[in-house]
């Protein structure tokens, strides 16, 4: 069995002050990587750093605002200046707007384009600034966080799901374009994950209805995504690039009749 280790590596996880991002940052740190948490300097960041310090994890904070494009270059350059090393990039940032991002007719057009712009930029710009340094120093591993909504069509959230589908396709392009330079690029597609944000914005009725379509019959946890992230980031996946790893409890696998059958 291959031991998953990222000992001696330097990693960055964007939007990592809570939820999936924080779980992934902690997992990378536990696997041996010096891990930077990229995010806004706020109460959530203070709490995240306090948790990591209490666990004595090798974690540092770097300021990052996804809506300010110069922030991407500053973030990457700060890490390179501090460590002169950069091995793992986890693009976790993403926004949604369930109240305005609806279907094609009912949804707000400005919200649709704003979501596309920010979510796609959050992968495009970090990769644009990180990859040249990775190439110069022998390669690296990039893990993008998309969504099962980027694979399975939805009756709403057109902007969010389209942006996540674009991230999946961008991942494959990056993998092909830079494989000969030692860059691996893979993407994780989470299903319904029990973050505070999900629990706060999705009713219990919706959660129950959704889980009827999940064969494993439970909501995922941030650590479920983090486990996939550290595998794809590490040398244990050294022959994997351009891949999509769904972490969704089997959502989308059964025939449409499945939910009726299990309910009965």
Image: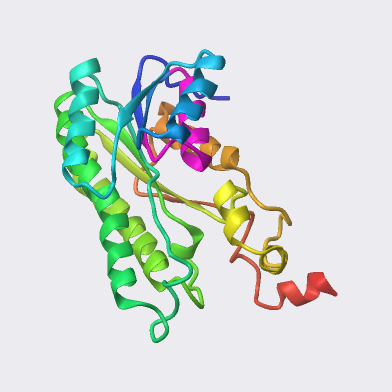
**Left or right of 175 on screen, residue 3:** right
Q: Which residue sits furthest front?
A: 43
Answer whether residue 17 is magenta in the image. yes
**Residue 231 visible within the image:** no
183 and 165: which one is in front? 165
Residue 52 at x, y percent in the picture:
51, 21
Query: Residue at coordinates 18% horizontally, 23% vertically from top-left?
Result: 137
Which of 64 and 256 lies nearest the eye of the viewer?
Answer: 64
Q: Give left or right: position of 107 versus 85.
A: right
* Quarter in which the C terminus is drawn: bottom right
**In this rendering, is residue 94 above or below 263?**
above
Query: Is residue 169 found left or right of 22 in the rendered image?
Result: left
Residue 13, given in percent of the width and then of the height, sits at 38, 35
Picture coordinates of residue 158, whole percent (x, y): 41, 73
237 and 32: which one is in front?
32
Quarter holding the N terminus is: top right
Q: Residue at x 53, y 34 (%)?
A: 23
Please tell me how many numbered marks the rendered image carries: 0
Q: Report if residue 81 is visible in the image.
A: yes
Task: Determine which quarter of the picture holds residue 185.
Answer: top left
Q: Is residue 140 above or below residue 264?
A: above
Name the quadrant containing residue 184: top left
At 48% from the left and 75% from the top, the residue drawn is 156
Extent of the magenta region: 13-32
> Was residue 177 drawn as part of the magenta stretch in this picture?
no
Dominant secondary-structure state across the stretch colored magenta: helix
Residue farthest along the bottom direction in this orientation: 105
């Amino acid at each position: 069995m291959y031991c998953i280790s990222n000992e001696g590596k330097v990693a960055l996880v964007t939007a990592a002050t809570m939820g999936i991002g924080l779980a992934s940052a902690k997992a990378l740190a536990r696997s041996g990587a010096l891990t930077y948490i990229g995010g806004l300097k706020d109460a959530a960041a203070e709490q995240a750093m306090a948790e990591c310090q209490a666990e004595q994890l090798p974690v540092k904070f770097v300021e990052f605002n996804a809506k300010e494009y110069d922030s991407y270059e500053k973030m990457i350059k700060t890490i390179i200046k501090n460590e002169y090393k950069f091995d793992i990039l986890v693009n976790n940032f993403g926004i949604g707007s369930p109240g305005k991002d609806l279907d094609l007719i009912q949804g707000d057009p400005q919200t649709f384009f704003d979501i596309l712009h920010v979510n796609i930029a959050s992968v495009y710009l970090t990769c644009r600034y990180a990859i040249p340094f990775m190439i110069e120093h022998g390669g690296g591993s990039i893990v993008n966080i998309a969504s099962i909504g980027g694979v399975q069509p939805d009756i709403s959230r057109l902007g969010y799901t389209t942006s996540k589908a674009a991230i999946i396709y961008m991942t494959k392009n990056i993998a092909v374009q830079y494989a000969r330079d030692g860059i691996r690029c893979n993407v994780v597609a989470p299903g319904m994950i029990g973050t505070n944000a999900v629990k706060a914005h999705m009713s219990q009725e919706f959660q129950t209805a959704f889980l009827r379509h999940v064969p494993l019959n439970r909501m995922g946890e941030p650590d479920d995504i983090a486990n996939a992230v550290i595998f794809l980031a590490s040398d244990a996946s050294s022959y994997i690039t351009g891949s999509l790893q769904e972490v969704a409890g089997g959502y989308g696998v059964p025939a449409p009749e499945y939910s009726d059958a299990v309910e009965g």
